[in-house]
Image (spheres, rainbow, N blue to C red):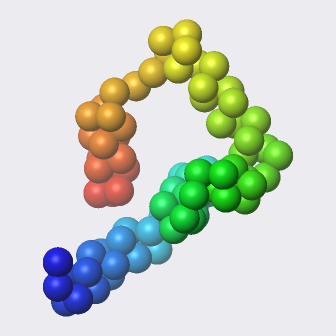
Amino acid sequence: MSKKEIDKIKTTIYEKVNRLNDKTLLQMVEEAVTAYSSPSQQEILDELSHEQQQRLQESLKQAEKGNTVSNEEVKKKANEYLSK
């Protein structure tokens, strides 16, 4: 991917994030960016606050119980939300 293409993607992401006002969604975006920019999983876990670790543990418990949402459904809902 060229630098121009990367810069275009960054600009698009910035514009969409800049329109967001939902605190929870903004926190999730921040967490995702932090997670993907960290070199190792352990470093990611070390960077999480106590509350974030609790949320992660609760999510894992829900997944073990089968309370999950498909990636396709999440993408669809995210696209609907971000296109507002």
Task: Left or right? Give the position of 60 relative to 76.
Answer: right
Quadrant in which the C terminus appears: bottom left
Task: Left or right? Give the position of 6 relative to 51.
Answer: left
- Residue 59 versus residue 25 in the image, above or below: above
Residue 14 visible in the displayed image: yes
Q: Residue furthest top?
A: 65
Residue at 55% from the left image edge and 15% from the top image edge: 64
Give 51 or 35, whichever is nearer the viewer.
35
Q: Estimate the x, y position of residue 18 in percent, counting from the top left.
A: 46, 74
Give 45 or 83, whichever is nearer the viewer.
45
Give 27 or 64, whichever is nearer the viewer.
64
Can you tell which quarter of the image residue 55 is in?
top right
Task: Left or right? Give the position of 54 relative to 37.
Answer: right
Residue 29 visible in the displayed image: no
Q: Residue furthest right?
A: 50
- Residue 22 versus residue 61 in the image, above or below: below
Residue at 17% from the left image edge and 85% from the top image edge: 2
Residue at 72% from the left image edge and 59% from the top image edge: 47
Give the total of numbered labels. 0
Q: Estimate the x, y position of residue 1 in percent, counting from the top left.
A: 17, 78
Task: Left or right? Give the position of 64 relative to 15.
Answer: right
Residue at 29% from the left image edge and 57% from the top image edge: 83
Q: Estimate the x, y position of residue 28 in percent, counting from the top left.
A: 56, 53
Q: Estimate the x, y position of residue 44 in percent, counting from the top left.
A: 64, 55
Can you tell which quarter of the image residue 65 is in?
top right
